Image (tube, rainbow, N blue to C red):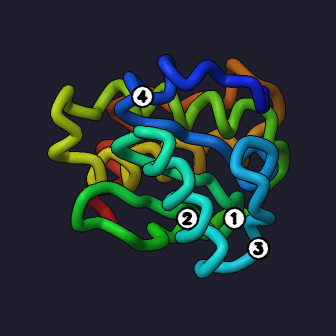
Amino acid sequence: ARTDIPKELLELTDLITPNETEAESITGIKVDSEESMKKSSEVFHQMGIKGVIITIGERGSYVSYEDIEEIIPAFKVKAVDTTAAGDTFLGALSSELKPDLSNLKDSVVYASKSSSFTVQKLGAFPSIPTRNVVEQALKEN
């Protein structure tokens, strides 16, 4: 993660999605507890960013936006290969997210479910699930 992100860019950012390490690099706050996630997201908000999702691996994602301030748990699976998990999460999130972020929480759940499939297979591209697979799995849960 870059630490020299232009202030003007941050002020125009609606949503930032760093992992724990990236969040620490940008904010200077070690992300190792829910309290530190909240502090880190507050720094992002002070930078002008409206929505923050800090991905925290097998624990899920910490979401901070308007009245949402919580950890959305990951789906528990047996991870084989984490390659492309983050890419799958972000692709799935952006495929579901409305421009006004009104469905942020549901989109994070969808993204988490998508990446839970990815980590169960070897390789990047072959492990990314289709929309039908994710939607069916969410219906079953």
Q: Which residue is mark 3?
A: 32
Question: Does residue 123 appear to the left or right of 86 in the view shown?
Answer: right
Going by the numbered disc 2, the residue's amino acid type is Ala
Marks 3/2: CA–CA distance: 16 Å
Judge by depth and name the residue closer to the eye, 94 or 17.
17
Going by the numbered disc 4, the residue's amino acid type is Glu
Task: Name the image quarter holding the C terminus.
Answer: bottom left
Discs 1, 2 touching: Cβ within 8 Å: yes
Judge by depth and name the residue closer to the eye, 62 or 35.
35
Question: Looking at the picture, how far across and down is residue 129, in whole percent?
Answer: 52, 32
The disc, 3 or 1, on the residue closer to the chain's N-terminal end is 3
Going by the numbered disc 1, the residue's amino acid type is Glu
Q: Which residue is mark 2?
A: 74
Image mark for residue 58: 1
Residue 30 versus residue 106 in the image, above or below: below
Q: Nearer the viewer, mark 3 or mark 4?
A: 4
The disc, 3 or 2, on the residue closer to the chain's N-terminal end is 3
Question: Does residue 133 appear to the left or right of 100 in the view shown?
Answer: right
Going by the numbered disc 3, the residue's amino acid type is Asp
Q: Nearer the viewer, mark 3 or mark 2?
A: 3
Judge by depth and name the residue closer to the eye, 40 or 15.
40
